[in-house]
Image (tube, helix red, strand yellow):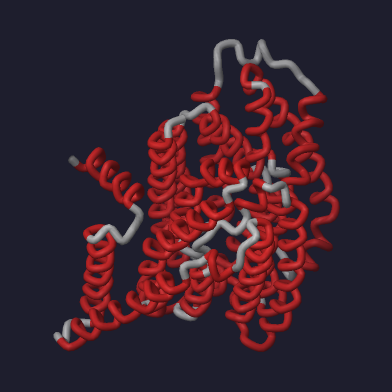
Amino acid sequence: MPPASKINNVFFLIFGQGINFVFNLLMLPITIRQLSLNDYGVYSQVVMVTATLYAILSFGVTSGIIVFFNRNKKYSQNILLNILLAIIVFLTLVYVFLCLFHTPIETALHTTNLWFFLRFFYFSILFQIAIDLFYAYFIFFQKIKLASYLTVITNVFRLSFIFVAIVTTHNLQYIFGAQLLSLVLCASVYFYFFKSKHIFLNFKYNASIITSVFKLCIPLSLTGIIGTLLIQTDGYLVNYYLGKNEFAIYRSGAFEIPFLSTVYSSISLIFFPEIKQLLYDKNYERIIMLKRKIIFNSSLLIYPLIIVFLFFGNELIATYLGNRFVRSAAVFVGYNLILFIRINDYSDVLTLTHQTKFIFLVYGVAFVLNLILGSYFVNIFGLVGPVYATFIAILFIAIAQLHKVTSILTTNIVYFFNFYKVVLTLIANVALIWLVYLFFFKLNFPNAIQILGTIITYLAIHFFIIFKFSIIDSSITTKIKSILHKKWV
């Protein structure tokens, strides 16, 4: 595929994820404002446990299955259906286990009615896995537009179901029922575009395919499972030590801005094939130059937006979630500090050089570190304690992986980052937003106008400068201009 097409596909994926982020962003305050603190706590518990179960029970097949598509393009649909059949059988067995042993699990998690809601919402995992498998199929066969459109359309469909259930019933049973029903219908839509003529007549059960896929995916998924548990640990600790209501407040602020982390990963994806080739050619000097470019351009795009959320975190959370959840602001600000670290894909070179065991080891140590520090910090700092622990754990992952990468590339960490430009970008943006805020403050506008005016003016000035004077990489600038022209002209 030509480089331009790859970049175009990346931006299509960013666009789809960005739209979904906006929809999800709008749903959170609606959910919080419509439910009582107790109900939102229960709702968050069920969602958290379901997300953890999904990470474990999906076995990484949603990403690993692409390897088998590549080996057997002709039989890709049969492979996918075999995997779905295996997932259905395994999820059923786990469900039986949970039916028998849910009481001690609830006791361990300090919950009382978790299973009451999870007993039917559990099956949402199956339909979410199905959706993700279909999505991987479309991406592999370069149906990027279809995948992006389906993601947006089905997400709107799903959120509409949830919205109606929340505002009309305020009943958790109906809310979870609406989510489950919407996922069933969304999976059906994906299947409609996936299926071919006589798909079931041509289906052949193949145990060797299932065994081969799981043999490949399970080892690869272990790092992903540990990564999910690393992030989820904080929620479990807050719920265990501080109780359900405090967990509800914590949960409402415990999120990064996901679209921002997508930006850096997408920029990395653009250059990933080139890094792969350069590694093959052992052109390490060029890789270092590319990584410096990726890191600097990511900081130009991400840092200004992080600074906005940090600068006005309390005001934005109070407006967004309401005064009842204003304490969530400290959690929100803490989580978004992590994005300052995440301006580089620290695993790409390690993955390409088959250092998967090292990656797993690093994540495993980080998980244990986060668990120990989180258990200690939550009793000292309260809600924000686990956030501090997560920041330290993520920092450890970045440093450990970066140290390994620099040894592979036979370089020093000081050559890997353009510290001068990155730090200058950070200082300049902090100074700029402060000056803009002082300007609006001096005009004695109402507080809301001051904040909104500062954000719009600051971002406008920053992005005008980096695009006008070509501070950002020209290939990225050209692509963004092309997309804007196609969308709006």
Whether residue 415 appears in this view of the structure is: yes
Does residue 460 lie above or below 323 as drawn?
above
Spot occupied by residue 146 in the image (x, y as percentages of width and height) = 43, 31
Give the position of the C terminus as an image quadrant.
top left
- Left or right, 98 with respect to 401, comes to right
Total numbered labels placed on residues in the image = 0
Q: Please determine whether, in this image, residue 10 is positioned above or below residue 385.
A: above
**Where, by quadrant of the figure, is residue 406 drawn?**
bottom right
Q: Check the image and name the residue furthest to the left.
A: 443
**Residue at image location 73% in from the left, 34% down from the top:** 88
In the rendered image, the vertical position of residue 235 relative to residue 488, given as above or below: below
Q: Using the image as rendered, state which of residue 219 and residue 322 is in the foreground.
A: 219
Residue 77 position (above or below residue 137): above
- Closest to the observer, 356 or 154: 356
Q: Residue at x 63, y 81 (%)?
A: 385
Along the line of sight, the residue nearer the viewer: 48 or 273: 273
Residue 175: horizontal and vertical position, in percent?
Answer: 53, 52
The percent position of residue 74, horizontal first and vertical second, equals 63, 17
Q: Nearer the viewer, residue 53 or 164?
A: 53
Residue 169 x %, y %: 48, 55
Look at 63% across and 57% down and name the residue there: 409
Residue at x-position 71% and y-position 79%: 373
Q: Is residue 145 left or right of residue 55?
A: left
Q: Is residue 258 visible?
A: no
Residue 413 appears left or right of 429: right
